[in-house]
Amino acid sequence: MTVVAVPEAPERLPGRTGGRCSQGVRLCLGMLRGALVGAHIGLVTAMGLALVGNGGVGAANAAIAGALVIVFFASGQAVQLLATEMADGTGMAMLMTSYLARIVALGAILVLAMSQQARLDAVFDRTNFFLGSMLALLGWLGGVLLTHSHQRVFVYDRDADDQFGGSR
């Protein structure tokens, strides 16, 4: 991440959004884009490996697992976009409620799958399901970290000139 000292803070920051969003939203959107690209690269890789190793059933299992990972994290990131512009307590409460709702939804999917175990035994492939979820997860995290390392964070500090002996 590059920190750039700017003498005065504009109300909105320029960028791809045309200056219509704050710095926090711009940073979150950038990380969401990078994460989605990384997760899809991981998902396509997992589906390709599963297709070669186990055919269409393996690829379908990898696709379902990867889709669950992407929906879980993308929905959390979407809520984070909203929470970025809220007061600290309100934003944190919204994020924690969102996380709880996403965990409950995953639990409900697990209960549903366990109740249909006889039907799923014929088509469920644990190895490719694991492969799809892990590669999508690693792709998501890699995309977030790579994007974050290239983002520019503007710092508005009028005392920076005095502290560091002149403008930078």
Image: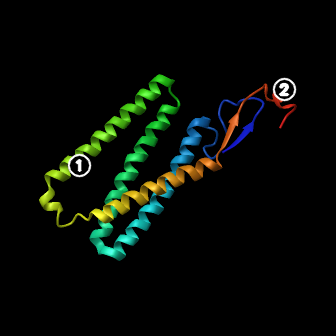
Residue in view at x 37 percent, y 61 percent: 132
Q: Judging from the image, what secondary structure is the residue with disc 1 in?
A: helix
Label 1, on which residue? 110
Kindly identify the amino acid type of the residue bearing the numbered disc 2: Asp
Circle 2 crowding by C-alpha within 10 Å: few under 14, some 14–19, many from 20: few
Residue in view at x 70 percent, y 33 percent: 155
108 relative position to 17: left or right: left
The furthest residue to the right: 166
Query: Would you place residue 123 above or below residue 12 in this image?
Result: below
In the picture, residue 62 is in which quadrant?
A: bottom left
Q: Position of residue 10 (x, y in %)?
A: 70, 31
116 relative position to 46: left or right: left
Kindly identify the amino acid type of the residue bearing the numbered disc 1: Leu
Circle 1 crowding by C-alpha within 10 Å: few under 14, some 14–19, many from 20: few
Label 2, on which residue? 162
In the picture, residue 65 is in which quadrant?
A: bottom left
